[in-house]
Image (cartoon, rainbow, N blue to C red):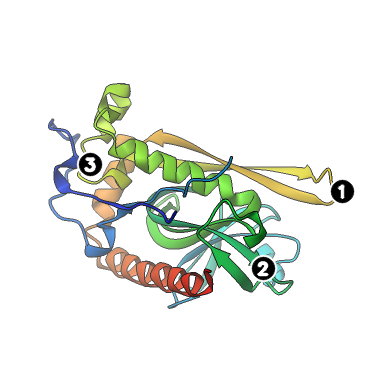
């Protein structure tokens, strides 16, 4: 079945006093996210910022390494430059889950929303995210496929948790995060990467996972401050368009 999406409402936020610098009265249109769900399973677009992971066969490997990105690391492409993300840390606004197959050139040749059909390919999540780049937050499109899949899954699970009315009852840190008026701002996902060797092929690969934590006061202050920045709003609009265009492209390949 296709991902289920539930509209986010401003009154999702529990009542209470917001921490200083974390209150926001309005959200940009692209930030009015929907909550995705991974389908039940038996156990390209406009130019914008995007998150990638440097692999041995990445086309722009030399340029990425010149920018300080190491093989296996996630990176951010923004402002015509590459930035290593140590670690990748982000908030998820929206995501869509697929199974996809790719050719040797990295082009998707098949896609499906039916997760029970493993012949359709590997797990694949397209996402609209806000990346913590240290001194600033940057909206971007991200793809999590194959070994990266668990990062996207953790983000989806975290967003769903943030929408749960019981979210504030999980502890004091959750009460602080729950004051943000939209669920996407209440949790942060941190990706981890480990180098492993495939038992079947003997080839090395990078296994990824994601850890979800409630947004801190610092996270919320950065988010609220960013939303007052016209460049941030424009970047979010471009990332949203790129995300939608990519999903439309994959949807056309679905059975």
Can the viewer see residue 86?
A: no
Residue at numbered disc 1? 202
Report x, y in % for residue 198: 80, 46
Judged from the image, the secondary structure of the residue bearing numbered disc 2 is: strand
* Res. 26 visible in picture: yes
Rendered location of residue 75, percent (x, y): 57, 58
Q: Which callout, 3 or 1, points at the residue further toward the start of the chain?
A: 3
Q: Badges 2 and 3: C-beta atoms under 8 Å apart? A: no
Whether 154 is drawn above or below 50: the answer is above
Numbered disc in front, either 1 or 2: 2
Label 2, on which residue?
Answer: 102
Decide if residue 78 is on the left or right side of residue 62: left
Q: CA distance from mark 2 to mark 3?
A: 39 Å
Between marks 3 and 1 in the image, the one whose residue lies nearer the viewer = 1
Q: Determine which quarter of the picture holds residue 156.
A: top left
Q: Which residue is pictured at 56% across the width and 44% down the height?
A: 150
Local crowd size for mark 1, using a 10 Å CA cut-off: few (<14), some (14–19), many (≥20):
few
| Quarter occupied by the N terminus | bottom left
Q: Residue at x 33, y 35 (%)?
A: 216
Give whichever of 2, 97 is nearer the camera.
2
> Which label's residue is closer to the chain start, 2 or 3?
2
Name the mark on residue 180.
3
**Counting other residues with Cα less than 10 Å from the Cα at mark 3, is it few (<14), some (14-19), or many (20 or more)?**
many
Structural distance between the alpha carbons of marks 3 and 1: 46 Å
Residue 77 is situated, as x and y percent measured from the top left of the image, at 52, 66
Observer-nearest residue: 92 or 79?
Answer: 92
Give the Cα separation between the discs numbered 1 and 2.
Answer: 21 Å
Q: Say left or right for 27 vs 209.
A: left
Residue 235 relative to residue 210: left or right = left
Is 94 placed left or right of 182 in the picture? right
Q: Secondary structure at mark 3?
A: loop
């Amino acid at each position: 079945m296709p991902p289920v999406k539930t509209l986010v409402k401003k009154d999702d936020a529990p009542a209470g006093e917001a921490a200083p610098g974390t209150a926001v009265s309005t959200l940009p249109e692209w930030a009015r996210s929907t909550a995705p769900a991974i389908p039940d399973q038996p156990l390209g677009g406009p130019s914008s910022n995007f998150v990638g992971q440097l692999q041995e066969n990445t086309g722009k490997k030399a340029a990425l390494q010149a920018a300080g990105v190491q093989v296996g690391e996630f990176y951010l492409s923004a402002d015509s430059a590459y930035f290593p993300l140590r670690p990748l840390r982000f908030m998820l606004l929206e995501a869509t889950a697929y199974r996809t197959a790719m050719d040797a050139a990295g082009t998707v040749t098949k896609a499906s929303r039916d997760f029970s059909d493993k012949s359709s390919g590997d797990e694949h999540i397209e996402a609209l995210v806000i990346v913590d780049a240290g001194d600033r937050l940057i909206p971007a499109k991200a793809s999590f496929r194959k070994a990266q899949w668990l990062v996207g899954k953790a983000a989806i699970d975290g967003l769903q948790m943030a929408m749960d009315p019981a979210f504030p009852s999980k502890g004091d840190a959750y009460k602080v995060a729950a004051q943000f008026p939209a669920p996407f701002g209440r949790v942060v996902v941190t990706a981890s990467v480990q180098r492993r060797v495939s038992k079947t092929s003997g080839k090395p690969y990078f296994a990824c996972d994601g850890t979800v934590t409630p947004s801190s006061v610092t996270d919320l202050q950065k988010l609220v401050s960013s939303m007052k920045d016209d460049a941030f709003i424009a970047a979010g609009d471009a990332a949203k368009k790129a995300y939608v265009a990519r999903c439309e492209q994959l949807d056309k390949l679905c059975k």
